[in-house]
Image (cartoon, helix red, strand yellow):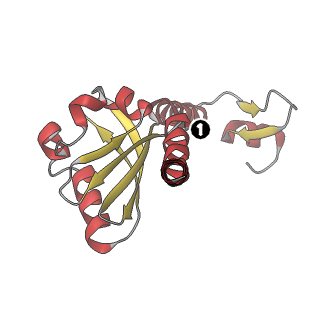
Amino acid sequence: YGSLARRSTVGEDANQARKRAAPELQATAILESIGDAFFALDGGWRFTYVNRQAERLLLHGRDELLGRNIWEIFPEAVGTTFYEQYHRALAEGTVADFEEYSVPFATWFQVRAYPVEGGLAVYFQDVSERRRAQRELEWYKLLAAQARDIILFVRYRDGQLVEANEAAARAYGYSR
């Protein structure tokens, strides 16, 4: 009877351990499945977690990052907006939300860094394509504004007029 009781206790301990581990496993599964790149840093600026998307965008595997200091791995980031915003978020206990171009990665990143107990949680995305499209749209708008020809911007899906240049406004007798 004594060995049966011990096995039951051991079984209960294993179940309790599984129950305690379940939220951590669920959190890991979530962080691996989200579209955002994510990493966590401890108070010494060492990587404590890196998801697959972050590995892809940072061009480094987890094995290269975990336990290592971010500023030693990416010394070119020292003194940049990334460095300043991460330090501010940790020092002030406030969220850092910014977009910045990274020269070494030739990429625009949208970053949200959250102070957490003992460190920083950083979510980020490559927004280079969106920034390129915005820049292109601004260029076309500038061209259209300077053109002497009538230029109308019409939404393809419903034919809604969304923009007209000054020449079109004059020709049709409406304000822009």
Query: Residue at image x 75%, y 43%?
Result: 169
> Which one is nearer the viewer's eye here, 117 or 5?
5
Query: Residue at image x 34%, y 72%?
Result: 93
Is residue 45 positioned above or below 57 on the image? below
User: Residue 104: in sight, yes or no?
Assistant: no
Q: Secondary structure at mark 1?
A: helix
Q: Is 35 on the left-hand or right-hand side of 90?
A: right
Residue 9 on image: x %, y %? 51, 54
Residue 49 on image: x %, y %? 34, 43
> Which one is nearer the viewer's eye here, 89 or 175?
89
Query: Residue at image x 24%, y 62%?
Result: 87
Find disc 1 in the rendering and name its residue. 145
Residue 1 on image: x %, y %? 55, 52
User: Residue 77: in sight, yes or no?
Assistant: yes
Q: Which residue is the extreme one toward the front?
A: 1
> Which one is nearer the viewer's eye here, 6 or 74?
6
Q: Which residue is the extreme one toward the bottom?
A: 92
The quadrant in which residue 120 appears is: bottom left
> Which one is nearer the viewer's eye here, 156 or 94?
94
The quadrant in which residue 64 appears is: top left
Q: Is 124 on the left-hand or right-hand side of 166?
A: left
**How many residues crowd mark 1 within 10 Å: few (<14), some (14–19), many (20+)?**
some
Q: How many marks?
A: 1
Residue 149 on image: x %, y %? 67, 27
Q: What amino acid does circle 1 point to?
A: Ala
Q: Is 169 on the left-hand or right-hand side of 137?
A: right
Is residue 112 positioned above or below 76 on the image? below
